[in-house]
Amino acid sequence: MAQVVRAALVQATWTGDTESMIAKHEEHARRAAAQGAKIIGFQEVFNAPYFCQVQEPEHYRWAEPVPDGPTVRRMQELARETGMVIVVPVFEKESEGFYYNTAAVIDADGSYLGKYRKHHIPQVKGFWEKYYFRPGNLGWPVFDTAVGRVGVYICYDRHFPEGWRQLGLAGAQLVYNPSATSRGLSAYLWQLEQPASAVANEYFVAAINRVGQEEYGDNDFYGTSYFVDPRGQFVGEGRRGRQRQGGGTPRPRPRLRPDQGGPRPVGLLPRPPPRRLRRARTAVTDPTPLHSRHRTVLPDWLALYYDRPIELTHGEGRHVWDAEGNRYLDFFGGILTTMTAHALPEVTKAVSEQAGRIIHSSTLYLNRPMIELAERIAALSGIPDARVFFTTSGTEANDTALLLATAYRRSNQILAMRNSYHGRSFSTVGITGNRGWSPTSLSPLQTYYVHGAVRTRGPFAHLDDAAFTAAAVADLEDVLGQARGGVAALIAEPVQGVGGFTSPPDGLYGAFREVLNRHGILWISDEVQTGWGRTGDNFWGWQAHAQNGPPDMLTFAKGIGNGMSIGGVVARAEVMNCLDSNSISTFGGSPVTMAAGLANLAYLLDHDLQGNARRVGGLLLERLRALAAASPAVRDVRGRGLMAGLELTEPGTDRADPQAAAAVLEAARAGGLLIGKGGGHDTSVLRIAPPLSLTVAEAEEGAEILGQALRSIE
Ligand SMILES: Cc1ncc(COP(=O)(O)O)c(C=O)c1O
């Protein structure tokens, strides 16, 4: 086996427009591939002029999403065509007001591996970068590519040793340093810093500079790109020579011709020793054996999605990858739990820093992150004199709320909504109004089920909102007439999750509250799915029913930890403190999960993800309604914010069609989209609940895939 990897880089004069600039790079890449290159990298913001020589808003036009923008997509095609790994530096637009100087890394089969965002952003004459870019926030990732472990460090970053070091510690074998640097001191340092970093960290560096003068200023980009090896030696294709520059001392260096259409430099790099690769692409895994092991050792009732179940290996933003190397747009977030984004650097950092200090202490000791998160949640809850108790799941949160309510009211009678789901424990299945999720009728509680949570089905569906609410209130009064003495609490999901994203008219639970107040019955709002702004209009689901004040208790879980197991109850102090014996939670409120929750919540609030859920969710719902209008299988589109449901029925009837829902789920997966399903006694509702940072482009893309999936079952 050959012991070398042929690597290439491109330095190119700006052509004057993006299309011809990209075309030029494609041509160079093909030529490099023909010479045997297996990896290639381009200069900083390669598809645009170096616009940072001026500070003008018009230059935001060069920005595009990564990886979903046109340039990265096109480079994925190029990678597939040439079989090369490609490092693609572009101006990235994440969302309005969030722009980065970024390089995407694409594997040799065209799959997108991830991106690096430049950390060190200059703001000096000719390099007014702070005007455009935020500092990078993705750390220093190293990508397992088909040719080895590749990192990126962009331009000005090179003056700062810590990133070089991080890349070395993370096992980088080759680091691309796409740049735009002008004559002067820079040209002197150009000879020192990258070679020194290559030596210090034992990897190769590909330094790439832009070439010539461009239209937006007098920077004189001097080209002279090169590869340097781990011993600090310049390696190239034999185009070495001596370079004269601005009065400096001539030094041995590779003289790579400034781009005038000549062949690209191709360096010979020793093939890196094989490593254990993190990515699935290079170790494609057939899920069948794992599926059979799952079936052998795990309970039969632990249902898996898809005929050929998926093993998810990693994620980024709103995307996940499976062990076969397929990439999906994730519109279900592991059951509404990846709330902000996959691999959100802020959360990852908080978790790893906390884990480095202490992972566990229990509730027997003071726990700073737990207290901080409790303070924040109490303040956000809307419940006066709020106390917070942390658990490890939504089930346990509801179980705790039931314990509190029954102890406080000295009654085991509970009101729950038809079609509800509140968890999988013995107490919570006893209040689940959905036989599909309630495996026993034995229960420590006596439960009465109330109408009202399903607007479009049931005996009141034909009524208008006001009459529907009045009928449900009358039903509640009637049910209370059957109960023996004091009922402890009503528990309700403002938008039913497992039940298929159904909800009552706004204000219904507020109307119930009047009746409950008369009887002293507590109101528990199960916000496990609806909390944290998911519904867009409100931070909590109960706020759509707030005319008679907040609930006595709310329960939360899922999204707050972004995947770390956090659940909890917020209750008025009087209710929370009613237990007269000790209670602990060994794992509830563990420092690592609390650190994740704090970082996740801060990100959510700082980036107004509730507002994003309202805006992007509104657009997504519009798209879904348009799809429904064209699809005879869709009976109803409902939801709010980023919580949308499509109920499927046999065309022309009102009969639920779980087979159609399963078929659409499969077809969406085949198209690269993960969604969920749910629904009362049958599973005929498609559930859509992406991370709250969903972009407009992703919403459009997901709707497009879903449209195709719906058409495929017609
Ligand atoms: C509304 C609601 N409550 C409670 C739960 C139970 O949460 P967990 O699965 O974390 O125990 C769920 C889970 O889906 C839920 O949707």
Image: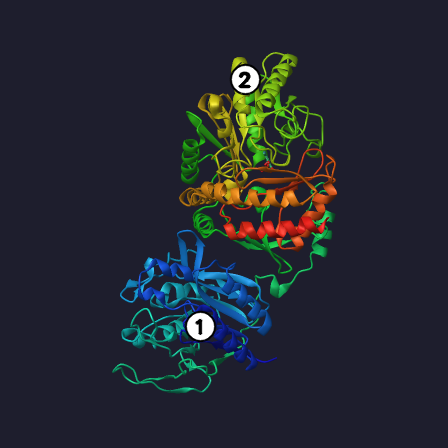
Q: Secondary structure at mark 2?
A: helix
The earlier-in-sequence mark between 2 and 1 is 1
Residue at the spot of label 2: 516
Mark 2 Cα-neighbour bin, 10 Å: few <14, some 14–19, many ≥20: many
Q: Secondary structure at mark 1?
A: loop
Q: Is residue 298 visible?
A: no
Residue 706 shown left or right of residue 386 in the figure:
right
Give the image quarter of residue 125.
bottom left
Tell me the CA gap for discs 2 and 1.
Answer: 70 Å
Camera-side residue of 231 and 602: 602
**Where in the figure is residue 296, as x and y percent of width and height?**
74, 48
Mark 1 Cα-neighbour bin, 10 Å: few <14, some 14–19, many ≥20: many
Residue 707 shown left or right of residue 191 in the figure:
right
Q: Residue at x 39, y 52 (%)?
A: 97
Q: Amino acid at mark 1?
A: Glu
Residue at the spot of label 1: 202
